[in-house]
Amino acid sequence: MNDYLKQLPGPLLKIIREIGQVSDDLNLVAFLVGGIVRDCILERSNFDVDIVVEGKARVLAKALAGRWNCRIVLHKQFQTATLFYKNFLIDISSARNETYDKPGALPIVQPGTVAEDLFRRDFTINALAVCLNKRHNGQLLDPLGGFSDLIKGKIRIMHDHSFLDDPTRILRAVRFQKRYKFSLSDRTRQCLKLAIRSNCERTVTSQRLFVEFKKIMKEADPLPALKMLNRTRFLRFIKPQATFNYHLVRSVQHFYDSNPRLSVLFEDEDFRWLSYFLAFISFFDADARNALVRRFHFTKHEKKSIIDALYKERSGKILSSRNIKKSRIFKELKKFNVPTLIFFRCAMPSQDRKEGIQWYLDKGRYFQLSLTGEDLKEMGVSPGHRMGEILSNVLDHKIDYNLKSRKAELLVAKKFIGSIESP
């Protein structure tokens, strides 16, 4: 195996070798392609395995699934398959050629060679492939000069109509440029500006654009890309003439950088991108947020965060109350999910408000009772409002007075039952 793949961990390298062996057994030509090849050359981590086969991808996929006894999902419409093996996700597709009926349309797909498959990709740096077959094992296929562009640090489109054919490539171009600190080639920059000037975003659905925008928000540092997109006026697809809060995005990034322990706990990337997004749209009012939620496909969790962020001022006033108890902070903040709380933490103007949210993120959100309703039933309490009131009061005591045991909770519960029953 050529040194191009030396960055890959041993278990993944073994899997890729096996794919080559099985391809040889089936007389199929197989290549490792795209981002994983690019990042191996750049000596960066990337575990997204993309295989392109000249022939029927499903034949190779089924053979590998049988060999590995792993889960397989076939996508017959697109001649692709996905394997789930040893914590790796392996995409296998048939080499294809694409043409576009009109700007922004989905491509018309036909069988093709690996070289043709590379030509349909977005940029030359992503149009690289490494052969996995024994005869040409490890050889780099680079029909478009992608290796040279990687060395020079250039983002280059395949042809002048690339951004018009697929305007989502504008977002990808900016994302890769800022991630790798590359530059756009002169012609690529000209074509990008011309495409934006022609309102190319109108030829694709807003959702397709937002999917790529979301990937920018998931970058380690999304700000450079966001600022560039704003300068080009391409962010109008989110909301025309909108004002975005770049300063608060930086504050959220600083929060994650300054809280490594929380960053590990919140390693789910949806926490991070959504915190960034809430900061980014912090100037949006209720009408703008509702329009956003209607226009794009957000999950229920994401919609809640977008709307809940409007409660920042109200929650801030409660948190700044004099001598506020921890139990009151708990009750106020438990209704919000983590991305919203991180947004609140970064957006609050005063230290006392920030400290209340930080306490909740660090400790408060983990408080729960060992005591249950069944325990209260055994103590003669009937289900209903009274039982809920007692449990709530016991939890308040646990938070405010640091009750350490179930026994302590039972004693407090008995006290409340006694006070309720007293004349």
Image (cartoon, helix red, strand yellow):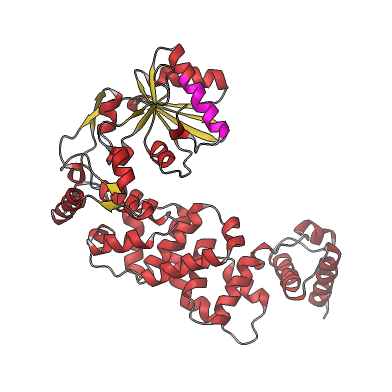
Q: In the visual, does 165 lie left or right of 375?
A: left
Q: Quadrant of the C terminus?
A: bottom right
| Residue 196, image x, y percentages | 18, 55
Image-based side of 311 in relation to 100, left or right = right
Q: Which residues are magenta?
A: 10-20
Vertical arrangement, residue 178 with respect to residue 7, above or below: below
Number of numbered discs: 0
| Residue 162 seen in the figure | yes
Residue 284 falls in image quadrant:
bottom left
The image shows residue 266 at horizontal and vertical percentages of: 56, 57
Residue closest to the far bottom: 322
Name the side, left or right, on which 74 lies relative to 419.
Answer: left
Is residue 337 visible to us here? Answer: no
Residue in the image at 56% along x and 36% along y: 87
Q: Position of residue 375 (x, y in %)?
A: 81, 59
Q: Nearer the viewer, residue 286 or 260?
A: 260
